[in-house]
Image (cartoon, rainbow, N blue to C red):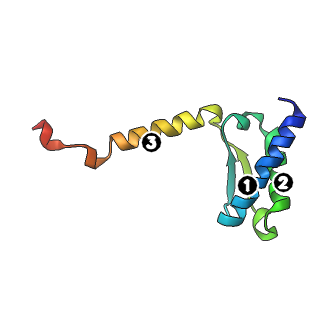
Amino acid sequence: FSIELLDEVGRHLGTGVATLINLFNPEVVVVGGRVAGAGEFIINPVRTAAMRQSHVKLGHNVRFVASPLGAIAGALGVAMLAARDLFEVEHLNPSAYV
């Protein structure tokens, strides 16, 4: 990626993040997926845009971090959902094994 492209993507993400900050007042915003691999090159423009566009009392207390999972975050989430559904108590029928 070029730095200019990451800056533009970060500004657009920051606009959406500002809306989420105004709605949910989070302590931390985690940037994940493939863009997280860009580290501070994506985090800085996201932070700048989000702070500029969010409510002053909310946006300035938020920490912005890149997910350490990177591009595998989505696949890991899907696998965890599948595992959770597979091992739910109501799916297990102990009488079938007796």
- Between 78 and 37, the one lying in front of the other is 78
Q: Position of residue 73 (x, y in %)?
A: 59, 37
- Residue type, numbered disc 2: Ala
- Residue type, numbered disc 1: Val
Tell me the residue at 83%/48% (across/down). 11
Are the residues at dot 1 and dot 2 in contact (C-beta closer than 8 Å)?
yes
Q: Position of residue 62 (x, y in %)?
A: 74, 59
Q: Is 96 left or right of 20, judged from the image as shown?
A: left
Q: Where is residue 57 in the image (x, y as percent from the top left)?
A: 78, 70
Going by the picture, which residue comes out furthest to the right?
4
Quadrant hosting residue 24? bottom right
Residue marked by disc 1 = 17
Residue marked by disc 2 = 49
- Residue type, numbered disc 3: Leu
Going by the picture, which residue comes out furthest to the left?
98
Tell me the residue at 12%/43% (across/down). 95
Residue marked by disc 3 = 81
| Residue 56 higher or lower than 85, as above or below | below
> Gap between marks 1 and 3, in whole Å?
25 Å
> Gap between marks 1 and 2, in whole Å?
9 Å
Tell me the residue at 72%/65% (across/down). 22
Along the polypeptide, which appears first: circle 1 or circle 2?
1
